[in-house]
Image (spheres, rainbow, N blue to C red):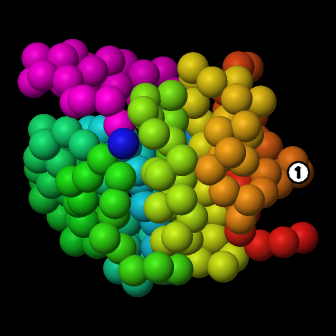
Amino acid sequence: MVDKPMNSMGFRFMSLYFRFRDYLSPPTKIIERIGIQAGTNILDFGAGSGSYSIPVAKIVGSTGRVYAADIHPLAIKEIRKKAEIKGIKNLYTIFTDCETKLLGSSIDIVLLFYVLHDFKDPDSIIRELERILKSNGILVIMDHKFDNTKVVSTISHATSALKLRDAEERNVKSKEKLLIFSKREY
């Protein structure tokens, strides 16, 4: 469960902020650090205006699928519009605040960028994301409002099936890191 979506004016301001943010810190640079391959199935949960969904859909190609989930109807509309303009056919939108309706164990990678701090009930969302991840799937989190300890605590509280792979912490900016959680036991 995510806090109530903002009004359309708030969403438009947020979209403008995302464009500025993406200019200063291009999503492709962050995505490269994950090592996404063609044929991968990805869920971008809390996709916003598609800053990460669109470039990821290009990387996974026609043999992969990208699902962009968001609580805001304008986000869904914006992502669909961008995908259509760019001719992207492997990107699917999901309007939700928790349940994805995706098959269990069907997703290789879940992206949870800049939204964990907005969840009213993170446990139910994390459990849903864990449910859809394949047995060797990963959850990649980046949150500018939570430090690493808070992120790990939030995930650990919701499920014991996802473990932080310390060796996989990857610096993005001085304050932000990609934290990678894996279902696979090492």
Quadrant housing the C terminus = bottom right
State the image coordinates of residue 131 (x, y, percent, origin top left).
52, 70
The answer to whether residue 111 of the structure is visible from this angle is: no
Quarter assignment of residue 17: top left
The magenta segment is 2-26
Q: Is residue 143 above or below residue 92?
A: above
- What residue is drawn where x is 77% and y is 73%? 184
**Along the line of sight, which residue is nearer the eye, 171 or 123?**
123
- What residue is drawn where x is 27% and y is 21%? 14
Categorize mark 1 by other alpha carbons within 10 Å: few (<14), some (14-19), many (20+): few
Residue labelled with disc 1: 167
Locate residue 167 relative to residue 52 in the image: left or right: right
The answer to whether residue 65 of the structure is visible from this angle is: yes
Q: Is residue 181 above or below residue 184?
A: above
Quadrant housing the N terminus = top left
Q: Is residue 16 above or below residue 180?
A: above
Locate residue 109 relative to residue 170 in the image: left or right: left
Residue 24 among magenta residues: yes
State the image coordinates of residue 45 (x, y, percent, origin top left).
40, 50
Quarter assignment of residue 84: bottom left
Residue type (three-letter) at the residue carrying disc 1: Ala
**Along the line of sight, which residue is nearer the eye, 181 or 22?**
181
- What residue is drawn where x is 28% and y is 65%? 91
Residue 5 among magenta residues: yes
**Along the line of sight, which residue is nearer the eye, 134 or 124?**
124
